[in-house]
Image: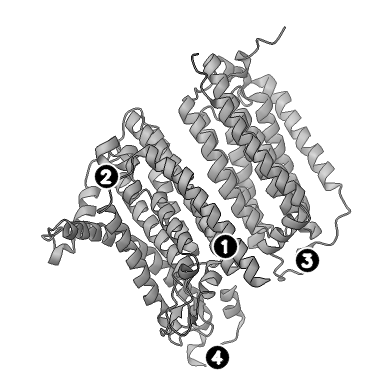
Amino acid sequence: MIPLSHYLILSATLFAIGAAGVFLRKNLITILLSVEIMLNAVNLTFVAFGRYAGDLDGQIITFFVMTVAAAEAAVGLALVIALFRHRESLNPDAFTSLKW
Amino acid sequence: MHAAGALARPARDGGGALMEPFIRPIAIGVMIFIVFNALIMASAVLVLAERKIMGFMQQRYGPYLVGPHGMLQPIADILKLIFKEELRPKGADKWLFTLAPVVSVVAAFVAFATVPYGAETTLFGLLDEPIKLGISDVNVGVLVVFAVTSMGVYGIVLAGWSSNSKYSLFGGLRASAQMISYELSYATALAAVILLAGSLSLREIVDSQQGTWFGALPQWFLFLQPIGFIIYVIAGVAETNRAPFDFPEAEQELVAGYNTEYSSVRFALFPQAEYINMVTMSAVATDLYLGGWHFPGVPPEYGWIVFLAKVSMFLFVYIWMRWTVPRYRYDQLMMFGWKYLFPASVLNLIATAALVLYFNA
Amino acid sequence: MPETITFYLFAALAVGASVLVIAQRNPMYSVLLLIASFGALSGLYIQLDAPFVAVAQIIIYAGAIMVLFLFVVMLLNAPKEDGADWDRTHPLRQRGVTRWGTLLVALLIVQLASALMSVREYRNPVGAQSDATSVSSVADLGRSIFTRHTFAFEATSILILVAMVGAVVLARREDAQ
């Protein structure tokens, strides 16, 4: 029986890796991928807690998180496509025209 | 679980005491081995069957020189492919070019792992506890088949992209777009069957189709869901990139599409993956709609023969369709999938749900 | 014992693949490595007695969302990151970032983990009676979703519709007119 703390540490690690990816990478698609990593880490936390509390709600919320992640990925990628058409670049530093 | 039970049980008679705990794991291992090899041989036999049936439909003999009636032709084909030169285009991505056919084939094999093909058998009294004929029986079996089939899309996409050639890229993109479009209708037709059977496990779906009505008509879901069956078969054919839906890999259109740049063994894995996908689709269709291994009057131990017969019938229909019906153009194909097949399957699901609710209330 | 082995195996695969995702230069490889990470997570879900979530993870995440990412990467022919930028920002290639960035990541992990582990109010673990088949059935999930969480379910369906329309509109090529 794996103790709950193992799963929590694992999901904390995954979340931190995803966060590091969002901050450090200069490629829009990789940033979106890092966001997906974070969402997955959260899913793992929910399912682990649900399992150890004997509640089914952990899995149910995972269902909704996945759906929202799908919607967000779709819209995010559509934005990336539109942005790429403008500047021919996927580097977020190329889109600084609103900076003062 | 069963193996652990066998290990825990004390030996019965003095003579076979040593072998007793090992018989079950050995039986399971032998079964896996047999199924794996059967799938490989099935793809080889299908190569020959396709060419022979195509030949007879076109009023000529198929291959008949190699071996009696051309039966050793697949061996000749495989030997030829193995001895060809292994080419790789210069700009092709080194890892992905080799990974793509591997992904295709692995997904094709794994998809068959949750498909049951027979009732429980004690191997004619050799085992104490009967083993179920089917590599694994998970309680979400239908979804596992669907999940692994949707992983097979990656083989084609990666093949198209990593070949670094525009024909391959277009072929790969089109094939994968087609596959993910028809997955929707596939899943909704599946959902209607799940409603009728009340379970996601393929074995339970098959077992809910035993028995007959009025003593003569077997209680298959085919008769309860005729439209769903047609939708499922069409979606299954489109999923495997076969028959009228094989535009992305048609020789006349895109110079063989995503596998243009492949040669020798890497190439051989693609048609093999396609044939094994065909077998899996036929097996799943048999389990879902044709009652699997149940047939009125056949004892359950010989159910797997019935299963084989039904799957062979499906495969024949696959081959028959390919050489009879003209190919869909790509935009016709996508329009059909989204505008006609998907609404039809959603309506089928709603109607099934309504009828199930009505008759159960 | 086999549980522990599979846990560490899947955990190592998930963490390793995720680190490689953010350390890869080629976005195509990143997407494929993320699919591997999702597969590992799916294995972990099966170990947590959540077979439906495991299969849904493969179907939705690895089978649909990642295909979408793959399409976009292929169609945009996403360029690899620029060399100078790469050296400046790569986490493992630069002393300043390595020193402070990794330290901050480690700090985040420790903080998150300790925050999560400080939850003590959960009831007795279900699987304490080890052999009890506490595998949640899909029927229970469905029953709960469609009765207690109906509103969230319907709201999600509207969300998907809005996202679909939005994605089509945003990615549409502007007409020259």
Mark 4 or mark 1: which comes first in sequence? 4
| Mark 2, secondary structure of its residue | helix
Residue that appears at 45% across and 40% down: B177
Which element type, helix, strand or loop, lies under badge 1? helix
Label 2 sits on residue: B264
User: What is the three-letter code of the residue carrying label 3?
Assistant: Ala
Amino acid tagged 2: Ser
Marks 3 and 4: same chain?
no
Query: Which residue is the extreme one toward the right?
Result: C121
**Residue located beneath label 1 in the image:** B352
Q: What residue type is labelled 1?
A: Thr
Q: Identify the residue position indicated by label 4 in the image.
A: B12
Residue at 24 percent across and 61 percent down: it is: B49
Of B270 and B234, the residue lying toward us: B234
Quarter of the image that includes the C terminus of chain B: bottom right
Where residue B109 sits, quadrant-wise, is: bottom left
Using a 10 Å C-alpha cutoff, classify the residue at mark 3 as few (fewer than 14 neighbours), some (14 to 19) or many (20 or more): few
Which class describes the residues within 10 Å of circle 2: few (<14), some (14-19), or many (20+)?
A: some
**Residue at numbered disc 3:** C128
Q: Which chain carries label 4?
A: B
SS category of the residue bearing label 4: loop
Q: Position of residue B310 (x, y in %)?
A: 37, 70
Disc on res. B26? none
The answer to whether marks 4 and 2 sit on the same chain is: yes
Residue A43 makes an appearance in the image: no
For the residues beneath circles 2 and 3, the answer to whether they share a chain is no
User: Could you tell me how many numbered marks the image carries?
Assistant: 4
Instruction: Name the spot of residue B179 as percent of width and height, x first.
Output: 44, 45
Q: Which of B291 and B172 is in front in this view?
A: B291
Name the residue rendered at 32%, 58% in the picture: B318
